Image (spheres, helix red, strand yellow):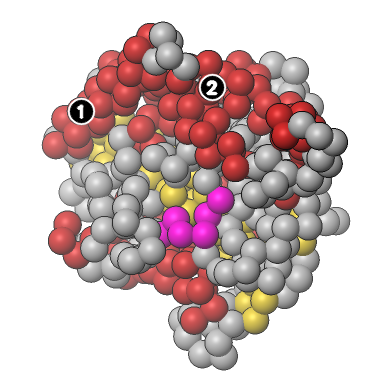
Amino acid sequence: MTYNAYITKEQITGSSEGPLAGKTVAVKDNISTDGVQTTCGSAMLEGYIPPYDATVVERLKAAGATIPGKTNMDEFGMGTTTETSAFGAVENPAAEGHVPGGSSGGSAAVVAAGDADLALGTDTGGSIRCPAAFCGVVGIKPTYGLVSRYGLIAYANSLEQIGPIAPTVEAAAELLEVIAGPDERDATTQDATVHGTEYDFAAAADGDIEGFDIGVPIELVEGADDGVAEQFWAAIDELETMGASYHEVELPSVEHAVQAYYVIAMGEASSNLARFDGVGYGQSGGYEGNWNDTFARSREAGFGEEVKRRILLGTYALSAGYQDKYYRKAQDARAWVKRDFDEALAEADVLASPTMPVSPFERGESLDDPLKMYLADANTTPVNLANLPAISVPAGETDDGLPVGIQFVGPAFGEETIIRAGSALA
Ligand code: GLN
């Protein structure tokens, strides 16, 4: 079975030596690959061949990885189910008839199906952690600034990071080691050694959580379905038997996180996607004497429904007269979320919650109900608003046999801590 997980299957061979020699690493189709089609899951970019590699792709090649192809995704990363792709929906190899999560659904599916050893995804509001949780694999959303975004085709650049998806925490950590580190072509990257990180992520996957103090944000557990919460608490019990302890914490701001996230993400998207007008980038609308009509024809034909919805809402939220009402408020909420996390993390090593409050939707279930889809991001979006690192690891299955993920959130550049916590389980 193919799961429709790849948009382009074309092998890119790296150096013959390096830490990833002999490994296949599938790459999400919003990450630029020199000479290989990169579509972002959009008809707008069908046939687009980037003339350069993203920094993470350069690093994969130098580390000896083989890239087997470019993975399917929600169009421009906008979605939670990998059903908004112009190249068709992706199946969940771990739960037939259900979505693989999104937007990096193709990347999680190839790893879950064993079609690639590892994969890269991107996470703007949960797009690595959600598919990892729904497909029963591991995903890491790095601290904002740990991994270069150079060559990532932007959806909402103040929120997104590229990160690894893998069958185990150790394998995800090894891949993170290869892609992490400052890049002069992305001024938002930082030298993490300044924050006490040694970039020794794989070594942190030692499962030793003796004495770990885990904070559990009650808001993020109370909103979860019973079957998901049950598996979450079973995982916490297991961690306790390994020497960790937990206490409940409060994050009152997270109640506003989904709203703030969507205002900011759609605002940034409306600006980032302005370049796709069929002249600079994207399929031509055909000039017939009027440039506005030309652009409109290109965008009408090239973008799918979800992308159009977000460009319209984002443009509205940023327009004169409404900016204070929406965008500025969302930025205030973002600052509040960040403060809440900092306070909670001052008294805990990591915070733990279910990655997703729900188990994988049946295919087609959320397509007619965007709000339902947006609300499923309740536990993942706060982490992007706060620029923090988080990992999702498998935490059993519901009674119906659907995968459940547990998420650990750490302090900024605390990748080693979340990797250690996750490695106790997977
Ligand atoms: N589901 C969220 C959205 O649709 C997150 C997507 C992502 O992280 N790229 O925006």
Determine which quarter of the picture holds residue 256.
top left
Q: Tell me, yes or no, whether the two marked residues, 1 and 2, touch with CB atoms within 8 Å.
A: no
| Three-letter amino acid code of the residue under disc 1 | Arg
Left/right of residue 124 with respect to residue 52 in the rendered view: left
Point out the residue furthest to the front here: 289
What's the magenta region? 148-153
Residue 333 image offset from top left, x and y in percent: 31, 20
Q: Is mark 2 within 8 Å of ligand 1?
A: no
Q: Which residue sits at x=68%, y=58%?
A: 38
Q: Which residue sits at x=32%, y=23%?
A: 331
Mark in front: 1 vs 2: 2
- In the picture, the quarter occupied by the N terminus is bottom right
Q: Nearer the viewer, residue 122 or 289?
A: 289
Left/right of residue 205 with respect to residue 365 in the rendered view: left
In the depicted structure, whether residue 327 falls above or below residue 271: above
Identify the disc placed on residue 315. Answer: 2
Left/right of residue 167 with respect to residue 384 in the rendered view: right
Residue 325 image offset from top left, x and y in percent: 38, 9
Residue with the mark numbered 1: 339
- Type of secondary structure dominating the magenta stretch: loop
Q: Which residue sits at x=24%, y=44%?
A: 411
In the depicted structure, whether residue 97 falls above or below residue 394: above
Q: Secondary structure at mark 2?
A: helix
Residue 181 image offset from top left, x and y in percent: 33, 66
Determine which quarter of the picture holds residue 386.
top left
Left/right of residue 374 with respect to residue 336 in the rendered view: right
Residue 210 image offset from top left, x and y in percent: 22, 53
Q: Which residue sits at x=38%, y=69%?
A: 177
